[in-house]
Image (cartoon, helix red, strand yellow):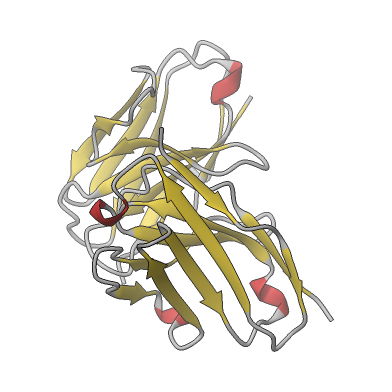
Amino acid sequence: DIQMTQSPSSLSASVGDRVTITCRASEDISIYLAWFQQKPGKAPKSLIFAASSLHTEVPSKFSGSGSGTDFTLTITSLQPEDFATYYCQQYNSFPFTFGQGTRLEI
Amino acid sequence: QVHLVQSGGEVKKPGASVMVSCKASGYTFTNFGVSWVRQAPGQGLEWMGWIATYNGDTHYAQDFQGRVTLTTDTSTNTVYMELRSLRSDDTAVYYCARGQEAFNWGQGTLVTVSS
């Protein structure tokens, strides 16, 4: 199985900051990577697919990059509603696998 | 507008089975497969399996092999997840999601396993 390793596990930031979350795959997954945002008690929400394509209605403050084994999610101009947990997931090959999550907190 | 609506919460005893449904609307059902993901209390997301809705092909995570079955009913645009031989550590919120990219998610179904 492909292992997905996110870093950091948690991140403290302030309103207005720019943050970057990293996701590393244990083998080449091309661009078959998605990013999700999850708030407490809610279902995850799709942010980015195919490593860098923004999902419908997701603001452009979110951006993704990378290919192969190394990927990043960048969030600019943090607002209170952006504080949540973020997950990456590879869908290059079965079984699909998630990173362990990055908790973004104030 | 895409919607995935899941069945309601369940309480089961250890050893029992549970079936959770996921009814899709707002898109051509057979154009996208459906993934199932679960989340234990306070934990991360765990991918369980995927079903191709156009032909019923399935792929399962090794941890659930032999205990989970995904099925699809194209007449009602519904996907079902059955988990058998439930244990207390199967207590979790179970989600369905559209497509391998998980573009859209159901609201989640809490399954509680307790004696």
**x and y percent of residue B23 in the render?**
48, 54
Residue B85, by quadrant, is bottom right
Q: At 17% across and 58% down in the image, what residue appears?
A: A28
**x and y percent of residue B87 in the render?**
68, 82
**x and y percent of residue A23 in the render?**
35, 46
Q: At 43% across and 59% down in the image, what residue appears?
A: B76
**x and y percent of residue A41 in the render?**
67, 42
Residue B93 vs residue B109, the one in the foreground: B109
Q: At 32% across and 74% down in the image, what residue appears?
A: B59
Compared with B32, A62 (above or below) is above
Q: How many marks?
A: 0
In the displayed structure, does residue A88 sit left or right of residue A13? left
Residue A2, by quadrant, is bottom left
Indicate the quadrant containing the N terminus of chain B: top left, top right, bottom left or bottom right.
top left
Residue A44 vs residue B17, the one in the foreground: B17
Compared with B43, A78 (above or below) is above
Compared with B14, B11 (above or below) is above
Residue B35 vs residue A94, the one in the foreground: B35
Indicate the quadrant containing the C terminus of chain B: top left, top right, bottom left or bottom right.
bottom right
Residue placed furthest toward the right? B115
Q: At 50% across and 17% down in the image, what residue appears?
A: A78
Residue A58, by quadrant, is top left
